Amino acid sequence: MNATTKPNTAFWIITVLALLWNIVGVIFWLMEHFFMTEELKAAYPPEELELINSAPSWGIYVYGIAVFGGLLASILLLIRKKIAVGIFGISLLAILLLQGYWIFGMDIVGVMGPGSMIMPIIVIAIAIFEYFYSKGAARNGWLQ
C-alpha cells in the first residue's frame, strides 16, 4: 500500500468513535430486549412503558440489524474493508425504518413530548454520517 492510500489520523479517530458508538447501541439493544428487569421497567413512566410494550414485534429484529450492522461495519472500517460501506448502508436503512415508525407510527411526540425527538434525530444523523464517511474513505482509497 502506498502513501497516497494511507488514511489520515482523523480516519482512525472517527473509526474508533464509530466503533464505540455502535458498541453502545448493541449494549442498549441487549439491555432493552434481554436484560430488562421489573425494577428497570418500574422506573419508566407508565405511558412510556405502554409505548414500548405496544411496539411491533418486528422492531426487535430491525433494531438488531441496525445496531449489529453498525458494529460489524465499524469493525470492517477499522480493518479497512470496502464492504463496510454496504453494511453501513443496511444499518442506515434499518435505522430509518425503525426510527420512522417510532416517530410517525407510534406518535412518540404525543406521548413523550417534543424532547423525545432528540435521540432519534441524533441516531439518524450519525448513521448518515457513518455511511457517507465510509463511502468517502472507499473513494479515497483507504479501504480495500
Image: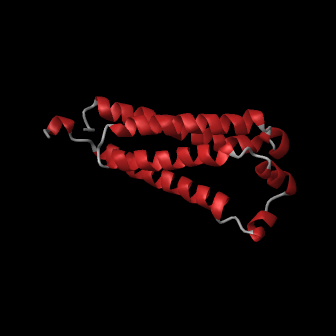
For residue 36, which quarter of the picture?
bottom right
For residue 144, which quarter of the picture?
top left
Residue sitting at 86 percent across and 56 percent down? 46
Q: Which residue in the rendered view is the most extreme toward the top?
A: 139
Quarter placement of the N terminus: top left
Residue sitting at 20 percent across and 36 percent down? 5
Q: Is residue 89 above or below residue 38?
A: above
Q: Which residue in the rendered view is the most extreme toward the left?
A: 2
* Percent x, y of residue 39: 77, 70
Left or right of residue 88: residue 119: right
Q: Is residue 41 above or below residue 10?
A: below
* Percent x, y of residue 125: 55, 37
* Percent x, y of residue 102: 72, 39
Query: In this view of the protein, which residue sits in the foreground, 47 or 58?
Result: 58
* Percent x, y of residue 71: 45, 50
Residue sitting at 79 percent across and 60 percent down? 44
For residue 114, which quarter of the picture?
top right
Left or right of residue 2: residue 117: right
Residue sitting at 24 percent across and 33 percent down? 141
Q: Which residue in the rendered view is the most extreme toward the front?
A: 57
Q: Is residue 45 above or below residue 85?
A: below
Q: Which residue in the rendered view is the most extreme toward the right?
A: 46
Colour scheme employed for the rendering of this structure: secondary structure
